[in-house]
Image (cartoon, rainbow, N blue to C red):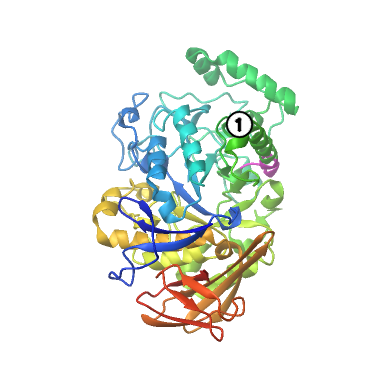
Amino acid sequence: MKRCFLGLVVGITLICCNTHKQQTNNNEEETVSEVIDDNIPFRWESANLYFLLVDRFYNGDPSNDINFSRTQETGVLRGFEGGDIKGITQKIKEGYFTQLGVNAIWLSPIVEQIHGATDEGTGNTYGFHGYWTKDWTTIDPNFGTEDDLRELVATAHEHGIRIVLDAVINHTGPVTDEDIQWNPEWVRTEPKCSFQDYEGTVKCTLVDNLPDIKTESKTNVELPSELVKKWKAEGRYEQELEELNQFFERTGYPRAPQYYIIKWLTDYIVEYGIDGYRADTVKHVDEWVWYEFQRECKHAFNVWKQQNDGSVLDDNDFYLVGEVYSYGISSGKQFDFGDRKVNYFENGFDGLINFELKSDAAKMDYESLFAKYHNSLYGDLKGKQILNYLSSHDDGSPYDRERKNPYRAANILLLTPGTSQIYYGDESARKLSVPGANGDANLRSFMNWDEIKSESKTQKIMEHWGALGRFRKHHPAVGAGVHQMLSEEPYVFERILESGNVNDVVVVGLDLDKELKSIPVGTSFKEGDMLIDSYSGKEAKVQNGMVEFVSDFQTVLLSKK
């Protein structure tokens, strides 16, 4: 069954309608329409993945804003600001992510963070970002509760959205007055990474005061005394110990540090039914650890599916994407440490984050960029996946830092072959430079909800992102299809995906003239086929390999009606 929706950005109401458009300034539109095919299967290689920092997205429960006496004054944007899991769930229910065409959400780590603050010269900093773990086995109350996470996953699945959590195995959080360093059998505090070779990247600490887990170890170690003391005080020591005994008995793994953490992370799959993990600091952990992690993730996902048959979305495997810092699509399957090359695709990963798109976007035209990515994904990387991004939480050189080209940014991110990763606020031109902030704090301001609600310029930007996002979501050919330019002037290309039960064809035109459109549609559409432009809502019949219609917009998104 097919149905048409008209999405209103403010209020995020979805209404059944006839397709139509209303013109606004900047060659964009006030409303967006689309045709949705319920039968299009979800594919990670063409997904729209939305990455957010939980603490900086939306405050759904002000009662949890302060915990563990985290009340010290901090540097600008270096303390907890109230965002939580309930806030994300609320926005899913409102239809915010549906409006953007998002079908997967990646959350920054939600495990319990260090209780104290550190000061590395930029003012006190708390673990609001989630990467400073104190206890992998429980959710930080600043982010929410177990029930909050359970509701989030269930609500997301009801809306056809997958949930991806962030897995940190490489390090604990920093040592503070409130947070004791773990036993030396578990962590190292030196040497500091040189990044000159494999050894100088893996068996070392990333920065000062970030204890490095000895993930290369295969020696039995006792639980860290810090955790034992904590669990006993919380009345759950015996339960945690029994679960660990069962895990090690089932797997036969040695009780080495990395296997404890693997157990704790995969519990979130069995307990809540999350759909994937983004793995942090991948190249700083021996690659075989990730292979073992992937195996246990798949086991846990299968257990969850067996126990929750009615909640299973599809037959996709558990998704694992890795952050191999500085990996780019041009590297193919191998990451080069200088003295050693590693294929992470052969060590558990479905995909790797691509650090190359932001620089390609700054120097390439559309066709050069799209052709490059198509050639790689249908060449050296055939059968593998990459996750493209233009800005993120820790990349100090994002594309379009001043947000001067938000429409081009949307075109590049959402139309480039591969999986797309929207960083929260890309779609609303959230500022990436904040007065008084230092370093990566600039990238982590609170979501600009006031601008989304009140500023027409922001709303128009979001409408463009939403139009492209929903088109991409419902046409997997956009992210995973064969790319072919049909016309250089005007710039028009097609994407074709024929895989299994999917036969998807789209034609896209960018930076077109206003009013009359004469668009070549190649040979994939037959003479007389009726096509619909999801951007304007206009329909046209294929005649002599062309469609013609009048539209006031410079973007065309064509598919068969």
Confirm whether residue 400 shows in the render: no
Q: Would residue 338 appear left or right of 534 to someone viewing this image?
A: right
Q: Would residue 181 appear left or right of 202 to someone viewing this image?
A: left
Residue 547, percent from left and from top? 49, 81
Q: Is residue 363 above or below residue 518?
A: above
Residue 284, percent from left and from top? 60, 44
Depth order, front residue of 78/392:
392
Q: Is residue 294 above or below residue 454?
A: above
Chain part drawn in magenta = 285-291
What element does badge 1 sit on? helix
Depth order, front residue of 315/389:
315
Q: Quadrant of residue 262?
A: top right
The residue sitting at the bottom extreme is 544
The residue sitting at the left extreme is 454
Q: Is residue 95 above or below residue 64?
A: below
> Which residue is rendered at x = 52% and y = 74% of the image?
530
Depth order, front residue of 11/414:
11
Residue 278, percent from left and from top? 56, 45
Is 460 contained in the magenta span?
A: no
Label 1 sits on what residue type? Val
Q: Examine the residues drawn in magenta and state their main secondary structure.
A: helix
> Which residue is rendered at x = 48% and y = 15% of the image?
234
Residue wearing tag 1: 270
> Which residue is rendered at x = 42% and y = 73% of the image?
538
Depth order, front residue of 426/202:
426
Residue 33, percent from left and from top? 40, 63
Residues packed near mark 1 inside 10 Å, few (<14), some (14 to 19) or many (20 plus): some
